[in-house]
Image (spheres, rainbow, N blue to C red):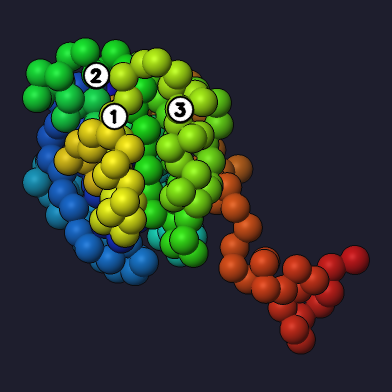
Amino acid sequence: MRVLGFDTSTLVSSVAVIDDDRVLADGRSQGSGRSADVLVTIDDVCRRANIAPLELDAVAIGAGPGSFTGLRIGMATAKGIAFAAKKPLWAVSSLAALAWDAEQCLANDQLLAHVDGVIVAVLDARRSEVFAGCYQDHVLLGEERVLAPGDLGAWVASIARDKPVTFAGDAIASYPALASLGSWVSAKTPSGIAVATLAIAGARIDILTSGTPTYIRPSEAEVMYPDGVPGALRKP
């Protein structure tokens, strides 16, 4: 099964085309906030994979949480490609994809004891907050959360209890104090390979017409203008 998977939830866009468990091509680029950059990367990866959109079996997108602008661009781009190619669109959690990448890092480093433990995917959410999700064997423990960096340790401890814990994500760059929580692997942002792989292994629900990004928290505009943007129609 040939799937185009990509994620634009962070400042790094990641794209891949896989054929079941074989990676045909993948690539990353800076600037997920611009649709042109994402499309250039997708075109480059598809060319290197020697596959046209019509030859794909499905498109998969990392639905968030993450950058509001990046998520909207990613979802719109994924819908456009899937609609034009008449293929289903599948979505996975961007945090779940990051956790999958972290698991690959652990396996490559032969830290097998930690592979069976809890992997905490942590992305910088800006506004002095982080997005976080705890996973074990690809299963979400509890719910994905947005919380202050200082609250991350206690929350993870309440979920992981005495299990080995490994952290992954770009939040460590913005909040260096998080290093004290435990071991961090090199995976920083979700990969297109992870998105495509999890989509194939998942429920494969087509969200082409109904899919929306997973924001978790309200946007800045919603916080600043709960009754609507000044000058626009007010909410009833």
Nearer the viewer's eye, disc 3 or disc 2? 3
Residue farthest toward the bottom in the current orientation of the protein: 231
Query: Which quadrant holds residue 190?
Result: top left
In this rendering, the answer to whether 211 lies above or below 155 is: below
**Residue shown at 57% from the left, 47% from the top:** 216
Residue 86 seen anywhere in this rendered image of the structure? no
Residue 10 seen anywhere in this rendered image of the structure? yes
- Residue beneath label 1, please? 166
Give the position of the N terminus as an image quadrant: top left
The Cα atoms of the two marked residues, 3 and 2, are separated by 15 Å
Callout 2 crowding tier (Cα within 10 Å): few <14, some 14–19, many ≥20? some
Residue type for callout 2: His
Q: Earlier in the sequence, mark 3 or mark 1?
A: 3
Query: Which quadrant holds residue 236?
Result: bottom right
As helix, strand or loop, the secondary structure at mark 2 comes to helix
**Residue shown at 67% from the left, 67% from the top:** 223
Q: Earlier in the sequence, mark 3 or mark 2?
A: 2
The Cα atoms of the two marked residues, 2 and 1, are separated by 7 Å
Q: Position of residue 220 (x, y in %)?
A: 59, 68
The Cα atoms of the two marked residues, 3 and 1, are separated by 12 Å
- Residue beneath label 2, please? 114
Nearer the viewer's eye, disc 3 or disc 1? 3
As helix, strand or loop, the secondary structure at mark 3 comes to helix
Q: Position of residue 132 (x, y in %)?
A: 44, 41
- Residue beneath label 3, please? 157
Horizontal side of 188 relative to 122 (left or right) equals left
- Answer yes or no: do the residues labelled 2 and 1 have beta carbons within 8 Å? yes
- Answer yes or no: do the residues labelled 3 and 1 have beta carbons within 8 Å? no
Residue type for callout 1: Thr
